[in-house]
Image: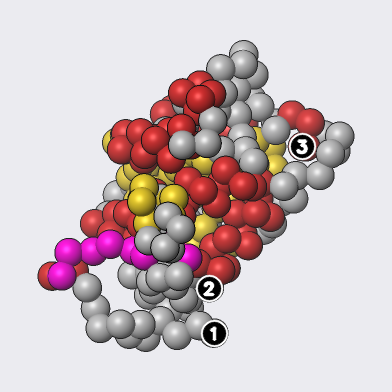
Amino acid sequence: MTQPFPLQRRHPDDLLVGLVSVSDRASSGVYADQGVPALADWLEKALIRPPQVVTRLIPDDRATVAAALRELVDEARCDLVLTTGGTGPARRDVTPEATLDVATRQMPGFGEQMRQVSLAFVPTAILSRQVAVIRELSDHAALIINLPGQPKAIAETLEGLRGDDGRVRVPGIFAAVPYCLDLIGGPYIETHDAVVQAFRPKSARRPAHSGAEAR
């Protein structure tokens, strides 16, 4: 599951996304990876302008994970990199460490909120060690977020929790991603509110869906 790059940014608001699944068994063919397909499907559903995506399926090895993250940010020029897998307490779970290895800034609120959402479902959410960071180059920056390994948990942490009336009770982390990308010089992305409602201060908002029609 390796795709070539560079990706082609055809519009200033094209979002370039790297999706990384970290798993010894999936990368060796013991079973099919579910994390990257789940992430790709979710982004396609959530974003008004479809993203350009490059994927990686790699083993639980700290140096390998760090190298993939650097490649996706520095060479593929991804604006957003989402990882799945390798965030628990087992000895082979090294995704957070590898992510911190490539970071220039940490964004602890993302990990805190993911655990808050997951705790509504399972008490073992406190064992999850997901982190989020920014990697900055002289002319580019990207947000890197570790996500859970299971497709259902991925959607829950991205979207948040809704009550029976459909209103968001616990916000998911993706609500903050578009404005974070704005602040680090990334593309302006918009979401379908029915999936996740992006939050921006009024001063940072463009007219609804300006130039971001689905293609």
Identify which amino acid the numbered label 3 is placed on: Ser
Identify which amino acid the numbered label 1 is placed on: Arg
Where does residue 118 sit, x and y in percent of width and height? 48, 36
Identify which amino acid the numbered label 2 is placed on: Pro
Sequence order check, earlier mark of 2 and 1: 2
Disc assigned to residue 50: 2
Q: Which residues are magenta?
A: 195-202
Specify whether residue 199 is painted magenta: yes
Q: Mark 2 packing: few (<14 Cα in 10 Å), some, or many (20+)?
A: some
Specify whether residue 8 is painted magenta: no
Q: Residue furthest right?
A: 30
Where does residue 85 sit, x and y in percent of width and height? 61, 35
Marks 2 and 1: CB-CB under 8 Å?
yes
Marks 3 and 2: CB-CB under 8 Å?
no
The structure's colour scheme is secondary structure
Q: Secondary structure at mark 1?
A: loop
**What's the residue at 55%, 51% (across, down)?**
155
Mark yes or no: residue 1 visible.
Answer: yes
**What's the residue at 64%, 25% (across, down)?**
61
Q: Quadrant of the C terminus?
A: bottom right
Q: Secondary structure at mark 2?
A: loop
Q: Residue furthest left?
A: 203
Left or right: residue 169 versus residue 22 is left
Sequence order check, earlier mark of 3 and 1: 3
CA separation, marks 2 and 1? 7 Å
Position above or below: 46 against 152: below
Disc assigned to residue 215: 1
Q: Mark 3 packing: few (<14 Cα in 10 Å), some, or many (20+)?
A: some
Residue bearing the label numbered 3: 27
Mark yes or no: residue 94 visible.
Answer: no
